[in-house]
Amino acid sequence: MKKDTQLGHLGRNPLQTHGTVNMPVYRASTIVFPDLETYGSRPADDYKIPRYGIHGTPSNWALEEAVAKLEGGYNAVSVCSGLAAINAALCAFAKSGSHVLVADSVYGPTRSFCNRRLAAFGVDIEYYDPLIGSKIKNIIKSNTCLIFCEAPGSLSFDMQDIPAIAQEAHARDIPVLADTTWGTPYFFKSFEHGVDVSIHAATKYIVGHSDVMMGIIVTNEKYWLPVRRAVADYGYCSSADDCYLALRGLRTIGVRMKQQMSNAIQVARWLAARAEVKRVLYPALESDPGYALWKRDFEGAASLFSLVLNPVSKKQVATFVDALKLFGIGSSWGGYESLVTAPNIAHLRTATRWPDDGPVIRLHIGLEDPQDLTADLAQALAAMAAAA
Ligand SMILES: *Cc1c(COP(=O)(O)O)cnc(C)c1O
């Protein structure tokens, strides 16, 4: 089945749910059993049978199965946030005395978790140039226990050659973990590109409506149990109601993402032609250094990108952002609505140097008409110039 057909059919079976088209919400903490024998004989490693609320109910499993199948993974588990998914996946492999390689362009809170938590447990954290490719082999150590990728990187959108990194990792039996939130299970087939453990902030496009926090970890068969056990050991879980909403969001991820990609490319091209803009950081544009890798590995692009403005004052940046009427100022992305932030990238780099002095603006392009969005950006750029 093609992925758009899968989206309509995965994770539901009306004949088993009294004919309801959608999997109902099974809320539960306690699950009861017919007798002590059955209660006592639950297989410890089977996390897709009724056990206890923390391990999920059919509502959770329906979403997890749909995401795993869409992405081409073996199995999946959902947790309370994208960050919890990242942390649980890291802790499934990292241990005291081991060495962890993390892309320098990684999501900021992932870096904080590594620096403040993993390092405190005696894990040696090393950040690497996201453009490293197969040269990663030169920095892999005998105690390297995982390689963490994120393509494209948060805020700066550097594209990583994940297959090249995975080839070197797998030659040494090291798992490749990747934050694939931008690619989504719809536009990036992680497991065909060498990822072993794919981590999604489902909060973004999977939920798609800016109203649920959730993370989903999808793994191949080899790493399913270590990851699933780590999630169980931390006591991370997701609610049945949230899984219902996430699965409802997933049904339309295809139409949303195709439309948002088209809108984003239109807005990004318009911005790239503006004199105020030094460069646009978006692998879906031919002019982007990551374009060839993106074209090779991805089936589409998320509608999230950054731009570097030619140097202007802090006050002008604030004037620009505040003047926007159709872009909400706030964290997160992947919903139906447009958003703007003005992140500071330079302080998040340690292995590489951020080359630009000009301010960075990150835009999330929603489902609005792109002509209205560019008109809004035009008037905000005019306000910025007037504030000089
Ligand atoms: C938002 C985000 C996360 C974290 O997801 P939460 O659900 O907000 O915890 C992780 N990675 C990336 C790339 C993100 O954008």
Image (cartoon, rainbow, N blue to C red):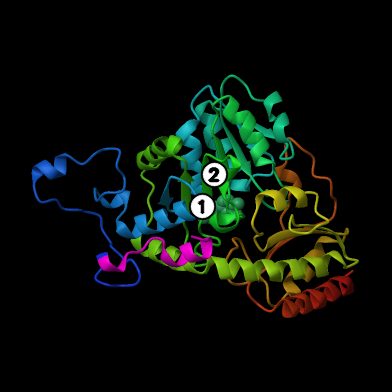
Residue at 74 percent across and 54 percent down: it is: 283
Q: Are marks 1 and 2 in contact (CB under 8 Å)?
A: yes
Image location of residue 8, percent across then percent down: 45, 67
Q: Which residue is mark 2?
A: 191
- Whether label 2 lies within 8 Å of ligand 1 gets the answer no
Residue 125 makes an appearance in the image: no
Q: Earlier in the sequence, mark 1 or mark 2?
A: 1
Magenta-drawn stretch, dominant element (helix, strand or loop): helix
Q: Secondary structure at mark 1?
A: helix
In the picture, the quarter occupied by the C terminus is: bottom right
Quickly name the residue at label 1: 71
Magenta-colored stretch includes residue 8:
yes
Q: Secondary structure at mark 2?
A: helix
User: 121 or 232, which lies in front?
Assistant: 232
Which residue range is magenta in the image? 1-15
Residue drawn at point x = 58 percent, y = 71 percent = 336
- Residue 307, how many percent across, how many down? 78, 59
Please give the name of the residue rendered at 58% of the width and 39% of the height, measured from the top-left corner. Answer: 194
The 10 Å Cα crowd at callout 2, few under 14, some 14 to 19, many 20 or more, is: some
